[in-house]
Amino acid sequence: MKEEDQIFIRGQRVSAHIGVPDEERANAQELVVHTRFSSSMRFQSSSDQIDQTVDYHAVYLRINEVAASKPRQLIETLAEDLAAMILADFHVAEVSIEIEKFILPNTRSVGVSITRRKSC
């Protein structure tokens, strides 16, 4: 995979206990996560093997696990936790996470977007 090549997961719905007031965190909320990452491995197109790239299904499963793993006040914290997990657990050089939350009236969503790189 070339440096500029990216893999993405768009519109992943996750369940999380999140929010600043205790009453907001009391019940799980649905959030939408958009993930984009570049592999730190070089994809060999002639191999057609999953071990030559990042298994996006495995990333998807881990995103669900991390989102549900503990209550958080801020979606910023969840975004950081997701980025750290992907960089640590997968052969990824860079990851971008965008999270949408559906809490404010008369808006489609509020959210956060971060990009993190693996330190050398």
Image (cartoon, rainbow, N blue to C red):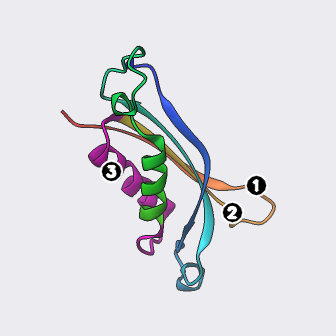
Q: Position of residue 47 (x, y in %)?
A: 38, 19
Residue 87 placement, left or right of 120: right
Identify the secondary structure beneath mark 2. loop
**Tag of residue 108:** 1
Q: Position of residue 56 (x, y in %)?
A: 47, 41
Look at the picture and state if 45 lies above or below 65: above
What's the residue type where badge 2 is placed?
Phe
Q: Earlier in the sequence, mark 3 or mark 2?
A: 3
Label 2 CA crowd tier, 10 Å (few <14, some 14–19, many 20+): some
Label 3 CA crowd tier, 10 Å (few <14, some 14–19, many 20+): some
What's the residue type where badge 1 is placed?
Arg
User: Which of 29 and 62 lies nearest the eye of the viewer?
Assistant: 62
**Tag of residue 36:** none
Identify the secondary structure beneath mark 3. helix
Specify start and end residues of the magenta stretch as a single range.
68-93
What's the residue type where badge 3 is placed?
Ala
Would you name the residue on which mark 2 appears?
A: 102
Q: Position of residue 80 (x, y in %)?
A: 39, 53
User: Which of 115 and 7 lies nearest the eye of the viewer?
Assistant: 7
Would you name the residue on which mark 3 appears?
A: 84
| Residue that appears at 37% across and 21% down | 43
Look at the picture and state if 102 lies above or below 97: below
In the rendered image, which quarter is residue 87 located in?
top left
Identify the secondary structure beneath mark 1. loop
| Residue that appears at 49% across and 32% down | 7
Q: Earlier in the sequence, mark 1 or mark 3?
A: 3
